[in-house]
Image: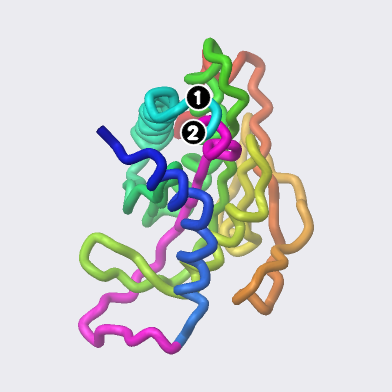
Amino acid sequence: MRDLIGIRKVSEHALRHLADMFADDTNPIDPTDVSVDATIVFADIEGFSDVVAREGDDAAAAVLDQLDAAVEAAVGPTAARVVKRLGDGVMIAADDPADGVLVAAALPAAFACRLADTTHPLRLRVGAHRGVVRSRGDDLIGYHVNVAARVAEQAVGGEALVTGALHDSVELSHPLRAVEAGQLVAKGVPERPRVFRLVVDAEQSPCEQPLTA
């Protein structure tokens, strides 16, 4: 059985600690690492720690199962991949920026649909960015990973934010569009990149008509 108390502690700080680590440019880099252009997507559950505290480990485990299902549904139609899970969150990477945008846009609704028949008022917050990152085995590290994590921190539950670098890399079409949402103001990201909120204008409920490529 998962140690969900431990998961809760990790989940509350995972994005911040991860971003702080990548913002520290004193970390040594293995010269055999490979640099790749990638779109990085982070997502985590807003309010998850309250579920753990109020309803206990079994309820929290059920929520995490629904997160896994939502991630699978969002990633499945694309060539994106799950890099790693972070407590109540996940890090996803895509070689094609269009795949990254599709995953980021689909995740909040995919998660909400799976909790529609429950009493949990939980929402997923998502952030995505594109840039050159370091590939170390199955993991990805570097400054642009930090930026993606910071974007996710700035999002509110139910929201998917992307940077201008990612937004400008793709051509959006109905039902997906982007709305300007200011700038990213975060530690370790001095340039304050533009941020856009992804909006899905679906005629049907996203639970009935999932967003696909």
Residue named by callout 1: 55
Q: Is residue 39 visible?
A: yes
The reply to whether discs 2 and 1 touch (Cβ–Cβ < 8 Å) is yes
Circle 1: residue type: Glu
Q: Residue 84: x, y in percent?
A: 33, 51
Q: Image point 34% across, 73% down: which residue? A: 134
Q: Neighbour class for label 2 at 10 Å: few (<14), some, many (≥20)?
A: some
As rendered, which of 1 and 184 lies closer to the eye?
Answer: 1
Q: Which mark is residue 106?
A: none
Circle 2: residue type: Val
Residue named by callout 2: 52
Q: Residue 101: x, y in percent?
A: 52, 46
Q: Image point 37% across, 56% down: which residue? A: 95
The reply to whether the magenta stretch includes residue 38 is: yes
As rendered, which of 185 and 144 lies closer to the eye?
Answer: 185
Vertical relation: 10 (above or below) 210: below
